[in-house]
């Protein structure tokens, strides 16, 4: 729909495919046991000059525990660290502490439970459905998506003709609110320099994350408006689209009345991507960065 997005998508595919092709050792170890998927700008097809790489490892388990052994997991992580550096990606954020290995059972059985948030399975599960791209173990990745969708659609059989995906939509809204709270909480506890950096991260992520969350909600609403139900197949199709691709899908629907609004949103988002494609020091000096109001705390967004 726009030249900026077209270029970003082409660059993302080229860099991502090159990285995947170099991870032969990790691919062999994962086999049919686990997959590695990317989230963030790479998964959204928006990789820029300074984009980092956010990855999750998700695998299956049996009566003996995880199918991907801990030793093999270490080798996979080492391969990922080595090859991402070779391909020009920054080091993993948090010194690699977010490069975790979850099981499908973790993602599904913790759904709706208190530990879902602090175990980070909530974020891993929602980002899998809303903005993910398989790096390794593509066949396993496809199975994982089906398995993660299933508990959200557990009442579908009795309501096939009028199923409303309220459970998933509530979780999507909760994800956005969680992002908002986390951004604010972390920022308040830092020094002035760290607050400035956190504010920058907040500014960059809030624009992308709001598209991630609400493009999915709009997709589900449009699907229900057209079919009076939403099937697991429709959600799988949604999961294969990036947030901006979901907007493009909406604009092509025959009865969609807000094509002009979609075009405006994508145009503004392209401006945002173009402006933020700078180093952190350069962005911190940018005069167009919106200042945070003094003595105020936002409650309606990050």
Image (cartoon, grey):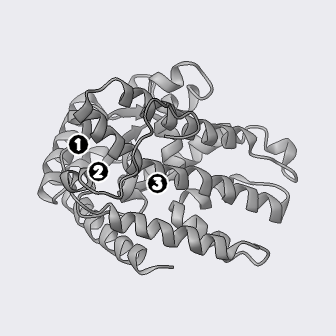
Is the residue 122 above or below the residue 263 in the image? above
Q: Is residue 111 visible?
A: yes
Compared with 152, 286 (above or below) is below
Question: Circle 3: is it few (<14), some (14-19), or many (20+) Cα within 10 Å?
Answer: some
Q: Disc 2 or 1, which lies upstream in sequence?
A: 2
Residue drawn at x 29%, y 30% as measured from the top left: 69
Q: Confirm or deny contact between disc 3 and disc 2 (CB under 8 A).
A: no
Compare residues 52 and 241 and report the one nearer the observer. 52
Whole-angstrom CA distance, mark 3 to mark 2, is: 15 Å
The local crowd at label 1, few if under 14, some if 14 to 19, many if 20 or more residues have their Cα within 10 Å, is some
Specify which label sits upstream in the sequence, 3 or 1: 1
Q: Residue furthest front?
A: 294
The residue lying at 74 percent from left, 45 percent from top is 165
| Position above or below: 41 against 65 | below
- Residue 283 image offset from top left, x and y in percent: 26, 55
State the mark number for residue 70: none
Given residues 165 and 255, the one toward you in this image is 255
Query: Residue 234 in the image: x percent, y percent?
Result: 68, 59
Q: Which residue is mark 1?
A: 92
Instruction: Indicate which disc residue 208 carries.
Output: 3
The residue positioned 35% from the left and 77% from the top of the image is 7
Counting residues from the start of the chain, the first of labels 3 and 2 encountered is 2
Q: Is residue 66 left or right of residue 221?
A: left
Q: Which residue is mark 2?
A: 53
Q: Residue at x 34, y 23 (%)?
A: 189
Determine which quarter of the picture holds residue 169: top right
Instruction: Please tell me whether mark 3 sits on a helix, a strand or a loop.
Output: helix
State how far apart marks 2 and 1 are (Cα): 7 Å
Residues under labels 3 and 1: Cα distance?
Answer: 19 Å
């Amino acid at each position: 729909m726009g030249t900026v997005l077209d270029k970003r998508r082409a660059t993302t595919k080229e860099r991502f495919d090159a990285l995947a092709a170099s991870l032969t050792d990790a691919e062999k170890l994962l086999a049919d046991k686990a997959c590695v998927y990317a989230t963030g700008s790479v998964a959204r097809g928006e990789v820029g000059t300074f984009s980092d790489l956010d990855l999750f490892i998700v695998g299956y388990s049996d009566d003996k525990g995880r199918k991907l052994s801990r030793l093999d997991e270490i080798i996979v992580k080492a391969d990922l660290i080595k090859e991402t550096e070779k391909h020009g990606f920054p080091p993993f954020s948090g010194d690699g502490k977010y490069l975790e290995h979850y099981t499908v059972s973790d993602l599904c059985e913790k759904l709706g439970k208190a530990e879902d948030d602090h175990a980070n399975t909530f974020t891993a599960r929602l980002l899998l459905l809303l903005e993910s791209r398989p790096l390794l173990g593509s066949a396993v990745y496809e199975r994982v998506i089906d398995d993660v969708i299933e508990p959200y659609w557990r009442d579908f059989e009795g309501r096939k003709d009028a199923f409303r995906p309220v459970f998933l939509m509530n979780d999507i809204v909760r994800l956005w609110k969680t992002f908002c709270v986390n951004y604010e909480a972390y920022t308040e506890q830092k020094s002035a320099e760290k607050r400035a950096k956190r504010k920058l991260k907040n500014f960059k992520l809030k624009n992308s994350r709001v598209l991630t969350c609400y493009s999915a909600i709009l997709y589900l609403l449009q699907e229900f408006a057209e079919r009076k139900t939403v099937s697991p197949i429709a959600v799988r199709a949604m999961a294969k689209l990036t947030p901006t691709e979901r907007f493009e899908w909406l604009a092509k629907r025959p009865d969609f009345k807000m094509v002009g609004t979609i075009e405006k949103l994508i145009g503004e988002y392209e401006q945002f991507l173009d402006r933020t494609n700078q180093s952190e020091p350069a962005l911190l000096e940018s005069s167009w960065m919106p200042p945070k109001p003094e003595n105020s705390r936002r409650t309606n967004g990050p």
